Image (cartoon, helix red, strand yellow):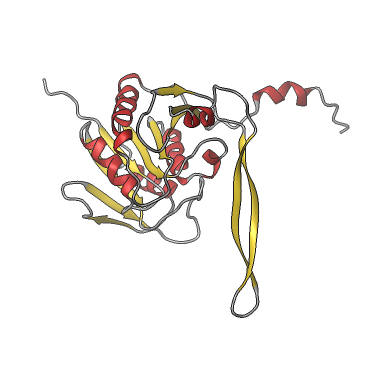
């Protein structure tokens, strides 16, 4: 009997020509049949945005020989929605992988990340999903040290499935010498943001977002600690945003109505 070859949807937020998606696609080709759907331009920081007020384009492209690829005019989440509805026509892939993102998605970054939101959308659709990110923003980023970990984590998800409404957020430190995998929680970390104000040639102000990533967490069980200590961080993420611990507190309030 012929062994089932899994179908793998590959998406990202850095755009269809980003080196990170090529690296991820190359790993997935060793596991199963690959279908790539990615934005036609960089969409970093888009979060879970979807396109509502204008039409979307989904065009087949031949960026890499022998791979079924589509360029999408929308957001990373649009890519997943269109893939499920128009390419797979409701017959969902066995796995969705997003990335490899150029830059970390640890701590609070998971909320802003187009990479992770694409994976979240796949999980909402009931597709096992993983987001991969590397601590290197450059187009010259070296992904070689990530390859064996990406393949093993993907194979484990294909073999074992994922808990209901759960996906994985995987982050890699830059460089060789990785110590292994750490299953972690999301660190209590956020951006201390500022806006650099400048003037355009017409003397009108405009603003560039800047900031410093602040870690407010002393634990050794979070993703920031793992990355700082040269581990691959793996955080299980779910999209139920209910603060369950707060329900008893709110039930104790006396609403005067």
Given the current orientation, which residue lies at the most extreme left position?
1
Report whether residue 162 is seen: no
- Dividing the image into 4 quarters, which one contains the N terminus? top left
Q: Residue at x 57, y 38 (%)?
A: 108
Q: Residue at x 57, y 30 (%)?
A: 187
- Relative to the observer, which residue lies in front, 7 or 170? 170
Drawn side of residue 123 relative to residue 68, left or right: right
Q: Residue 215: where, in percent of width, then height?
A: 61, 35
Q: Residue at x 36, y 22 (%)?
A: 161
Drawn side of residue 170 relative to residue 250, left or right: left
Drawn side of residue 247 relative to residue 53, left or right: right
Q: Residue 245: where, in percent of width, then height?
A: 68, 22
- Relative to the observer, which residue lies in front, 5 or 204? 204
Looking at the image, is 139 positioned above or below residue 198?
Answer: above
- Relative to the observer, which residue lies in front, 113 or 257? 113
- Dividing the image into 4 quarters, which one contains the C terminus? top right
- Dividing the picture into quadrants, the one containing residue 146 is top left
Report whether residue 22 is seen: yes
């Amino acid at each position: 009997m012929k062994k089932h070859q899994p179908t793998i949807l590959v998406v990202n937020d850095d755009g269809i020509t980003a080196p990170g998606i090529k690296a991820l696609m190359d790993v997935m080709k060793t596991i199963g049949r690959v279908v790539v759907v990615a934005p036609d331009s960089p969409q970093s920081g888009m979060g879970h945005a979807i396109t509502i007020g204008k039409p979307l384009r989904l065009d087949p492209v031949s960026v890499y020989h022998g791979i079924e690829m589509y360029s999408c005019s929308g957001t990373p989440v649009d890519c997943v929605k269109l893939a499920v509805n128009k390419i797979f026509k409701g017959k969902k892939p066995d796995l969705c992988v997003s990335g490899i993102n150029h830059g970390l998605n640890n701590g609070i970054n998971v909320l802003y990340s187009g990479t992770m939101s694409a994976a979240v959308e796949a999980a909402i659709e009931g597709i096992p999903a993983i987001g991969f990110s590397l601590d290197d923003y450059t187009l010259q980023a070296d992904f070689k040290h990530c390859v064996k970990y990406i393949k093993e984590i993907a194979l484990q998800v294909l073999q074992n499935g994922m808990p209901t409404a759960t996906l994985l957020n995987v982050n890699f430190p830059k460089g060789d010498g990785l110590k292994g995998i750490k299953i972690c929680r999301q660190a209590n970390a956020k951006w201390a943001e500022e806006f650099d104000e400048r003037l355009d040639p017409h003397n009108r102000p405009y603003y560039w977002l800047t900031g410093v990533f602040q870690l407010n967490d002393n634990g050794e069980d979070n993703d920031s600690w793992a990355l700082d200590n040269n581990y691959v961080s793996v955080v299980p993420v779910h999209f139920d945003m209910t603060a369950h611990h707060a329900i008893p507190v709110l039930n104790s309030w006396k609403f005067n109505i």
